[in-house]
Amino acid sequence: MSDYDRSKFYGKKNRFFNSKTSTVKEIDKVEDKPKGIKKTTILAREHHVEDRSVSPKPLVRESESTSSITISTAQHSDSLKQQLPKKIVKCVKLLDDGLICTENVQDYLQENDDYLVVGIVGTQGVGKSTILNLLAHDSITNDLKKSIFKYSQESKDNIPDFEISPNESDQNVKVDNVIFKPQSTSDIISNSNGTNGIDFFITHNRIMFLDCQPFSSVAVLDEFIRSEAKVSSMVNDFLPLENSGEIQGLQMTAFLMSICHVLILAQDWFLDSNVIRFLQTAEMLKPTISNPEDELVDHFPHLIIIQNKAQMEDFSPKKFQQMQQIYKTLFNKTKMHIESGMGLGSGRIMNSLSPDNCGDPINLFLIPEYNEKTEELYKSHPSLEDLIRKLRSNILGATKYHLNNTSEKHWLVYCSKVWDHVKKSNFFVEYTKLMP
C-alpha cells in the first residue's frame, strides 16, 4: 500500500472514529443534558421571577391590596360610626302617654358611666323649659336670648293682646336654637301646656336634661276630661277623674326623684305653699326600688330651688335670708339633699349673699327677669349669663349619688323599671282616698 493510499485510508478511518467519538460525546451530553437543563431551567425560572418583580403586574397587585386595605379601613370607620351615639339637636320624648319611649332615647346613649341626670318640675308657665334651654347651651348669645325669651317688652309692644292667631304668634319668634319647646302665645290663649310627658336631651359633655310637664295644671285635667281613653293608659282606671291630673303629676315627680342626680324645683314667685306640699307628697309616695341583689335602694337627689323672674329686692341680703330660713324650715325633714352648696348663699357668686349675711346656705338660686330694654342697667346683681354659668358649674360639681346602674344604657333600663314600679305602686291609690 502506497503512502497515498495509506493516508487516504487512515484519514477516512480517523474521520469515522472522530465522528463516532463526537457522537458518543453528544450522546453523553444528551445523557448529561437533563441535569444541565434542569439547572438552567431553575436558573431561568429564578431569573424569570426576578424579572417579574419589576414587571407592571406586581403594581396592579399592590394597587389591589391597597384598595382592599382602604376598603377595610372604611369598613372599620363605619363600624366606629355605628358604635358612636347619634348627635341630638332637639329634645325627644322619654315618657309619653304613660309609656317609656326607649326607642327614642337609646340611639343617643353610650356605654359611659360618667354622666349626670338633671330633671326639673314646677307648675305651668314658671319657665321650666326656659331654664333648661339656658343650661343646655354652653354659651348664651343674643340670638339665643331672643329665641328663648319670646315675651320681651319689644314683642309685647308689637303684638296686640288677643288679636293674633296661633300661627302668626309662632312666626314672630325664632326657634332655631331652642332645644325644649317653651310655652307659646297660642298655648296661653288655648290654656294648654307647652310640654307633655317628659322630654329628654343630652349634651356633648354627657349631661341629661329632663323637662317634665307641669303638675297641678288645669290643662292636664282638661285633657283627661276630653279624652278619657288616656286615663287608662296613663293612670289607674279606678282613680276618680278629678284626681287623675294630680296623681299623674305625683307619679312623674316621684319618678324623677328616683332617676335624677339633681332635681330642680322652679317657681316664679315666693312662696307657693301648694307647690311645697305637692313636692313633699311626691317624696312621701315615692316607692323603694329593689335591685337584682334583692336589696332595697332608696335614692334621693340634690334639690335646687330656683326662683325664676326674680326682682331686684330678692337679691338683697335681708330678703334672701328670709327665703332661706323659710325653705329650710319647710324642708327640715326631707331626705333630699338641700344643703349641697349649690345656691347663691354660699358667697362664691355674690359677696353680699354670704353665710355671714344670710345664714347657713341652702340650694336656693335666683334667676332675674330678663328685659331687653333694661339689660344694660345696673341691677345690683350679676348678669344673666354669669348667673347661668355659675349655676351650670354648681350642677356639674354636684356629688353623684348611686343610681343602681353603671352606664347610660343601663340608666335607661333602670328608668323602665322605676316607672313600672311607680305605676303599680298602691301608695298613689291609697292617697286618692284621702283627697277631697
Image: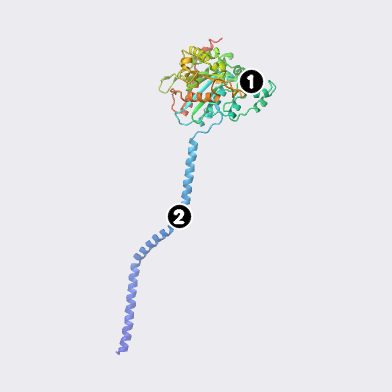
Q: What kind of element bears circle 2?
A: helix
Whole-percent x and y of residue 222?
Answer: 62, 17
Label 2: how many Cα within 10 Å (few below 14, some 14–19, many 20+): few
Q: Nearer the viewer, residue 281 or 2?
A: 281
Q: Is residue 390 visible?
A: yes
Disc 1 residue type (three-letter): Ile
Residue at coordinates 47% horizontally, 43% vertically from top-left? 73
Q: Nearer the viewer, residue 88 or 130?
A: 130
Q: Quadrant of residue 29?
A: bottom left
> Which numbered disc, 1 or 2, marks the residue that appears first in the sequence?
2
Whole-percent x and y of residue 177?
Answer: 58, 30
Residue at coordinates 34% horizontally, 77% vertically from top-left? 19
According to the picture, the residue beneath numbered tag 1 turns out to be 188
Q: What kind of element bears circle 1?
A: helix
- What is the distance, in whole Å, between disc 1 and disc 2 at their CAs? 75 Å
Q: Quadrant of residue 55?
A: bottom left
Q: Is residue 199 visible?
A: no
According to the picture, the residue beneath numbered tag 2 turns out to be 58
The circle on residue 237 is none
Whole-percent x and y of residue 343?
Answer: 49, 19
Q: Is residue 185 left or right of residue 55?
A: right
The answer to the question of whether label 1 and label 2 lie on touching residues, with beta carbons closer than 8 A, is no
The colour scheme of the drawn protein is: rainbow
